[in-house]
């Protein structure tokens, strides 16, 4: 069986279009198919659309959260409830083209790889500022993290059951799936395709949400910010000690006191800013630890047609 996991947030317009697009190529898959839609606390009629699809097709299952828990929680829930020996993660907006599914299934059936990922070869239609920062993010995180992040790779990927089970073993609360997919290893091949724009509706991601998401990725997969804070503190301390010795010796030998209160104030403010920046970096990691120690569930189900609940 092939499980198709689809996180949904305010996707009432795209859900029927997505289902129709997959059904059009379903005979080419050569596998029985189950749809697993995860309604992530949508505020529109997404849940009603899923109910109608479930009544129409027994292969359609849905999970509905009690509120919006975020895409990472939706992905985790979908992988937890997927029954197939092959599992594919897709967005409902058709930016992930269903036409690639038959080729992905055929590649995995050869038994030489564990995952077929997808990678956009361009960012046509995406705001330039978003593309600029996305590229800089991938350059930065690949320099400071031991986990590989490939520019243009999407969450759209098909995995074997073994790889899915390995990902589910990583039950951490603070999740960054792009990193987790890479961290677990397994043989992965990528299919390139041109960027596709949404067929309907509006994206729920804005620039600041993506920026915060990128910070989460850095914190989850790199200790470099903590090392930078330590290095900055050490350099500041040594520099201050050297300057203090220099001032003391000059005053002792030449009886020359140091003037310049404005420059002194600037130095104090600069060092204070560095301290606050370092505390902010440390605080980000401490905050992640705080959330992990609470041991709260990734999500709360409110409604489902899954016979296991």
Image: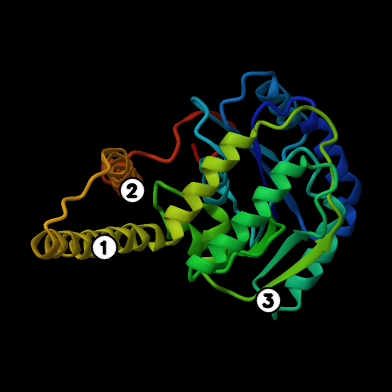
- Tell me if label 1 and label 3 are in contact, CB under 8 Å: no
Alpha carbon separation for disc pair 2 and 1: 14 Å
Mark 3 vs mark 2: give the one in front: 2
- Tell me if label 3 and label 2 are in contact, CB under 8 Å: no
Which badge, 1 or 3, is on the more N-terminal residue? 3
Based on the displayed image, in which of its 4 quarters is residue 291 positioned? top left
Mark 2 surroundings within 10 Å by alpha-carbon count, few (fewer than 14), some (14 through 19), many (20 or more): some
Which badge, 2 or 1, is on the more N-terminal residue? 1
- Mark carried by residue 81: none
Based on the displayed image, in which of its 4 quarters is residue 287 positioned? top left
Disc 1, SS: helix
- Mark carried by residue 113: 3
Q: Is residue 80 left or right of residue 155?
A: left
Alpha carbon separation for disc pair 1 and 3: 53 Å
Disc 2, SS: helix
Q: In this view, does 52 lie to the left or right of 210?
A: right
Residue at 23%, 45% (x, y): give it: 259
Disc 1 target residue: 239
Q: Quadrant of the N terminus?
A: bottom right
Residue at 69%, 24% (x, y): give it: 46
Q: In this view, does 85 lie to the left or right of 258?
A: right
Residue 44 percent coordinates (x, y): 67, 18
Residue at 86%, 38% (x, y): give it: 20
- Mark carried by residue 274: 2
Q: Is 28 drawn above or below residue 38 in the view shown?
A: below
From this viewpoint, is residue 254 visible?
A: yes
Observer-nearest residue: 188 or 4?
A: 188
Q: Residue furthest top?
A: 44
């Amino acid at each position: 069986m092939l499980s198709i996991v689809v996180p949904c947030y305010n996707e009432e317009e795209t859900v029927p279009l997505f289902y129709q697009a997959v059904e059009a190529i379903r005979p080419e898959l050569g596998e029985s198919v189950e749809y697993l839609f995860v309604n992530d606390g949508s505020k529109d009629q997404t849940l009603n659309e899923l109910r109608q699809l479930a009544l129409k097709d027994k292969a359609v299952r849905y999970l509905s959260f009690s509120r919006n828990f975020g895409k990472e929680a939706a992905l985790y829930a979908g992988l937890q409830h997927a029954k197939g020996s092959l599992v594919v993660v897709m967005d409902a907006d058709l930016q992930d083209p269903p036409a690639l599914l038959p080729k992905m299934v055929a590649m995995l059936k050869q038994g030489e790889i564990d995952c077929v990922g997808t990678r956009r070869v361009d960012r046509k239609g995406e705001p330039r500022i978003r593309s600029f920062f996305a590229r800089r993010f991938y350059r930065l995180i690949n320099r400071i993290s031991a986990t590989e992040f490939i520019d243009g790779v999407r969450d759209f990927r098909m995995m074997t059951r073994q790889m899915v089970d390995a990902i589910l073993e990583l039950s951490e609360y603070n999740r960054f799936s792009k990193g987790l997919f890479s961290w677990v290893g397994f043989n992965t091949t990528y299919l390139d395709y041109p960027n596709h724009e949404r067929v309907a509706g509006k994206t729920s991601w804005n620039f600041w949400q993506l920026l915060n998401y990128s910070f989460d990725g850095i914190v989850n997969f790199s200790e470099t910010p903590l090392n930078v804070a330590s290095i900055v503190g050490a350099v500041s301390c040594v520099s201050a000690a050297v300057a203090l010795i220099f001032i003391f010796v000059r005053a002792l030998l030449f009886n020359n006191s140091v003037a310049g209160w404005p420059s002194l104030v600037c130095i104090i403010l600069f060092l204070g800013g560095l301290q606050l920046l370092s505390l902010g970096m440390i605080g980000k990691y401490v905050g992640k630890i705080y959330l992990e120690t609470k041991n709260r569930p990734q999500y709360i189900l409110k409604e489902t047609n899954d016979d296991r609940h």
